[in-house]
Amino acid sequence: MATRSKSTAVKTKRSAKARLATTGDGFKKPSSDLPARSATVQRVTRETRVYVHLTLDGSGKSEISTGVPFLNHMLESFAKHGFFDLTVKASGDLDVDDHHTVEDVGLVLGRAFRQALDDKRGIRRFGQATVPLDEALCTAVVDISGRPCLVYKMPIKQEMIGTFQTELVHDFMKAFSDEVGMNLHLILHSGRNPHHIVEAAFKALARAMDTATSLDPRISGVLSTKGTLS
Ligand SMILES: [Mn+2]
């Protein structure tokens, strides 16, 4: 099993390298120097078991199974609109409620981003997107700075989306931004339907993360006057 996982990881690394080496955007680096830009993270506690595999330079394909259907829907949308390849497998104490599972999936996904970005060499670092879904409009602004800070301005009147507590979106975003080690602002401009509002937020986050994690050919080393984003 361990050998199989390892060979899969190596395969992913090679394909990511090949893609980066042929982007044709002027970004030239020796192929041996290119980062893998993918990560596998597992975390097991008495409350949840979470497995995440993330490839930053993906095509948006996902395999998501968290036991929380609305969260599955949001993560599929996140992968699609961020062009991340994402596998998430989670099982948690849903008999208590969805809280531990939603929060821990956010945490492990954040950790996967942090690992995949390694020392953050060459990344754009900042990203922002404003995304509508019908009447809902949401902005996400990120700075993958190494400094965790969440500003969550998403007032949602409704307590529930089906069986999903809307408050858990805040918990997910806090765990995610803390673990990536980034500044995340989420601002809701308008919206009536809570499903639309939250989906617009996840899509905005996806597009902002896609920009912030992408490589800019003009950046040598780390984009910081301090010389580090850790
Ligand atoms: Mn939807």
Image (tube, grey):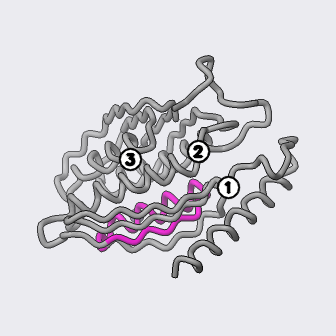
Q: Is mark 2 within 8 Å of ligand 1?
A: no
Location of residue 208 in the rendering, given as x and y in whole percent from the top left corner? 54, 42
Give me the disc on residue 36: 1
Label 2 crowd (10 A; few <14 / some 14-19 / many >=20): some
Seen in the picture, residue 102 relative to 229 is either above or below; the reply is: below
Alpha carbon distance from label 1 to label 3: 21 Å
Location of residue 140 in the rendering, given as x and y in whole percent from the top left corner? 46, 38
Foreground: disc 1 or disc 3: 1
**Dot 3 amino acid type:** Phe
Q: In which quarter of the image is residue 42?
A: bottom left
Which residue in the rendered view is the most extreme toward the top? 225
> Do the residues bearing badges 2 and 1 touch, measured as CB atoms within 8 Å?
yes
Q: In this view, does 161 lie to the left or right of 11?
A: left
**Dot 1 amino acid type:** Ala
Location of residue 148 in the rendering, given as x and y in whole percent from the top left corner? 39, 33
In this view, the residue in front, 130 or 84, is: 84
> Do the residues bearing badges 1 and 3 touch, measured as CB atoms within 8 Å?
no
- Residue appearing at x 62%, y 17% in the figure: 225
- Residue appearing at x 35%, y 59% in the figure: 105
Location of residue 1 in the rendering, given as x and y in whole percent from the top left corner? 51, 82
Which residue in the rendered view is the most extreme toward the left? 96
- Mark 3, residue position: 176
Q: Is mark 3 on a helix, strand or loop?
A: helix
- Mark 2, residue position: 118
Label 3 crowd (10 A; few <14 / some 14-19 / many >=20): many
Q: Does the residue labelled 1 lie within 8 Å of ligand 1?
A: no
Provide the residue span drawn in magenta: 67-90
- Residue appearing at x 56%, y 56% in the figure: 81
